[in-house]
Image: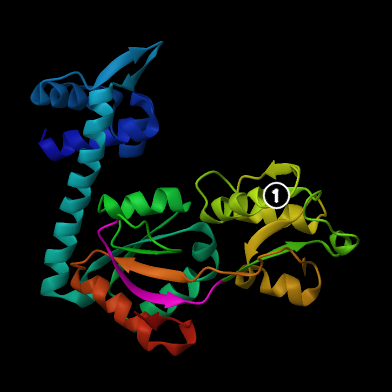
Amino acid sequence: MTTTARLRAFVALADRGSVRGAAAALVVTESTVSAAVRALGEEVGVALLEKEGRGVRLTPAGARYAGYARRILGLLDEATAAARGEADPEHGHVRVGAVTTAGEHLLPALLASFRARHPDVTLGVDVAPSATVWPMLRHHEVDVVVAGSPPSDLDARVRARRANTLTVVGAPSAATAFDPATATWLLREAGSGIRATLTALLEDLPGDPPQLVLGSHGATIAAARSGLGVTLVAREGVGRLLTDGALVELPVPGVPLSRPWHVVTHPDATASTELLVRHLLEDEELGWRGV
């Protein structure tokens, strides 16, 4: 078994938390995963795993090694895509990462438009909270990210921006005698950029308003529509609901907030990734502007 295969088995185990989960993800036997990770540990020369009940967990050394393993595998995949794309960008591969709201409301039009112009470029898409998406770019697991502002310490290049406004919304009944200091606030999942912004907003409110954590963007919007509470959202993501009157904007000090979307790539983006960036800047209907 190659070192690359061993690394993939180890990262799958680290991500899934069990040999069984890693084997299912890789579509191999559990014994194959166990043998690969054991051989990798022998190669590294330190224990990467330790027993925990009936299962295993990463040792501190294993957790540190997993970060490097992800970057190594990401770079290998990127290198393959870069080489193939450099030879023929129109038949290359682009791995796209996006935060949840962008994945639901921006990516469909962007990718459909791109595919219509460049049908032979294959696309991979990962949609996750910002706390997951930015490390994927850092580890070279994706080629381009569509999200809010990138972390200041990220070695990356902002290629385009698009206007995005955050506003507070609730059911029409919530507008009656609305008080942000006593309303029930609906929060997104952990790792969400909008959740972090809303948490900071709540810290400036008097008192300690009740909070309810929902598991996704869709669940938060549905809960707001039902009158369960109010929440902070991208206005564009609920535009139709606002027009139909299912939701209304509510007055909160400091809101609305301008939080532009960003398209971010590695400094040395692949040729096929450059095709995607160039396309989104040329298609004026998509609303992106170069940086």
Question: Residue 210: x and y, percent?
Answer: 76, 42
The residue that mark 1 highlights is 186
Question: Residue 230: x and y, percent?
Answer: 75, 55
Rendered view: 143 above or below 86: above
Q: Residues within 10 Å of mark 1 (few under 14, many from 20)?
A: many
| Three-letter amino acid code at the position of disc 1 | Leu
Question: Residue 262: x and y, percent?
Answer: 41, 69
Q: Is residue 66 left or right of residue 83?
A: right
Rendered view: 256 above or below 11: below
Q: Nearer the viewer, residue 10 or 45?
A: 45
Task: Assign the C terminus to one quadrant of the image.
Answer: bottom left
Figure quadrant of residue 267: bottom left
Figure quadrant of residue 134: bottom left
Question: Residue 192: x and y, percent?
Answer: 52, 51
Task: Assign the N terminus to one quadrant of the image.
Answer: top left
Rendered view: 141 above or below 169: above
Residue 141 shows up from this direction: no
Does 89 appear in magenta?
no
Q: Is residue 124 left or right of residue 129?
A: left
Q: In this figure, what is the number of numbered marks?
A: 1
Identify the colour scheme used. Answer: rainbow
What residue appears at the point 24 percent right and 63 percent down from the top-left corner? 266
Secondary structure type for disc 1:
strand
Does 160 appear in magenta?
yes
Residue 221 shows up from this direction: yes
- Residue span colored magenta: 154-164
What residue appears at the point 41 percent right and 48 percent down from the top-left corner? 132
Figure quadrant of residue 78: bottom left
